[in-house]
Image (cartoon, helix red, strand yellow):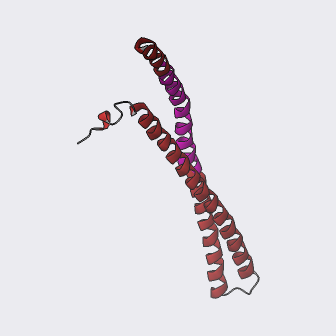
Amino acid sequence: MTHFRNTFMGNTGFEEMKRYTRQGTEFCREIVNILNERAILEQNHAKSLRRLGQRMSKASCSVPASPSSSSWKTVGVEMEKEAEVHRDFGINLIEDCIKPLSTVTEKQLKPRRMMEQRVEGRYKTWLDRYTEHTK
């Protein structure tokens, strides 16, 4: 059985590590995109529901008072409340999931690139010395 710590050993270990970390970054970005689409859908759904609820309430007020018209007015009010839930969910999705995940993903890029450059620079130095030594 291969242990995780042994996965990145050997001649191709660093390249494997780079590939692995880049896949993680791409995955996080894709998750952010998906959640962002969901937040937009929730907010658009909220706007549509709110408009329908307002129309329902307005239509039920235009007819004489009756149990039926008050029931439809209640349906309109409930649609507006549901719209508020969807709007809040979309906002919370952005604030509590998308922004933190984006921040973490972007904060990892700079140190990762710096480390990759350092390792590649040292590898080049080592390779040059090795080539000189073998001549």
Please identify the quarter of the rendering in which residue 13 is found: top left
The residue furthest left is 1
Q: Above or below — where is 48 with respect to 105? A: below
Which quadrant would residue 56 be assigned to in this image? bottom right
Q: Is residue 125 magenta?
A: no
Residue 116 placement (x, y as % from top left): 50, 27
Q: Is residue 116 left or right of residue 44?
A: left
Q: Which residues are magenta?
A: 94-122
Q: Identify the residue at image location x=74%, y=76%.
A: 58
How many marks do you count on the picture?
0
Residue 41 or residue 121, whichever sits in front = 121
Q: Nearer the viewer, residue 24 or 6?
A: 6
Q: Is residue 64 left or right of residue 99?
A: right
In this orientation, which residue lies closer to the viewer: 47 or 79? 47
Q: Is residue 92 visible?
A: no
Q: Is residue 33 visible?
A: yes
Please identify the quadrant where the C terminus is shown.
Answer: top left
Residue drawn at (50%, 47%) of the image: 27
Give 48 or 79, whichever is nearer the viewer: 48
Magenta stretch prevailing secondary structure:
helix
Q: Is residue 72 above or below residue 88?
A: below
Question: Can you give x and y, in whole percent of width and height, for residue 130 in the image?
Answer: 42, 16
- Residue 88: give x, y in percent of width and height: 59, 56
Rendered-image quadrant of the N terminus: top left
Question: Farthest residue in the right direction?
Answer: 62
Residue at x-position 64% and y-position 87%: 68
Q: Is residue 57 above or below residue 135?
A: below
Q: Is residue 36 left or right of residue 123?
A: right
